[in-house]
Amino acid sequence: MHSHTLNYEYRSTWSDFAVVRNAAGFIGRACAAWWQGIVARRAYEHTLEQLSRYDDHLLRDIGAPPAILRDVQIVREIARSRRARWLSV
């Protein structure tokens, strides 16, 4: 009776390397897109913070869209709420 053994030797091929490289490329692009989203959001929040220092009439005069006016109002309300909470302690 012969004993049959299963011998399997894995040998790395260039196609395996390409799969890993493509996966790393995809992950790198996904991380870059995620980071760009964070940077864009921070820039938008910084812009809103700067615009919140201006009067609503001035912002309307320079043609700020209603969405920006609404977001500026939200930033002002958050700042007012933080000041009120700090003063109440």
Image (cartoon, grey):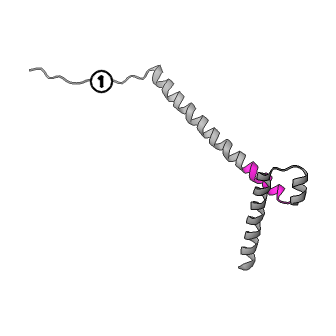
Question: Is residue 51 highlighted in magenta?
Answer: yes
On screen, residue 41 above or below 6: below
Compare residues 81 and 14 and report the one nearer the observer.
81
Residue at coordinates 49% horizontally, 25% vertically from top-left?
Answer: 17
On screen, residue 37 above or below 77: above
Where does residue 64 sit, x and y in percent of width and height?
84, 50
Tell whether 50 sits left or right of 22: right
Residue annotated with mark 1: 8
Where does residue 74 sit, x and y in percent of width and height?
74, 61
On screen, residue 82 above or below 45: below
On screen, residue 44 above or below 57: above
Tell whether 71 sits left or right of 38: right
Compare residues 77 and 16 and report the one nearer the observer.
77
- For this orientation, the residue located farthest to the left is 1
- For this orientation, the residue located farthest to the bottom is 89
Residue at coordinates 72% horizontally, 79% vertically from top-left?
Answer: 88
Compare residues 10 and 43 and report the one nearer the observer.
43
Image quadrant in which the C terminus is located = bottom right
Numbered circles on residues, count: 1
Query: Callout 1: helix, strand or loop?
Result: loop
Where does residue 23 sit, x and y in percent of width and height?
52, 31
Compare residues 20 and 66 and report the one nearer the observer.
66
Find residue 24 and report its image quarter: top right
- Badge 1, how many Cα within 10 Å: few under 14, some, many 20+? few
Where does residue 32 sit, x and y in percent of width and height?
64, 38
Question: Is residue 82 highlighted in magenta?
Answer: no
Question: Magenta segment range?
Answer: 42-54
Find residue 9 and report its image quarter: top left
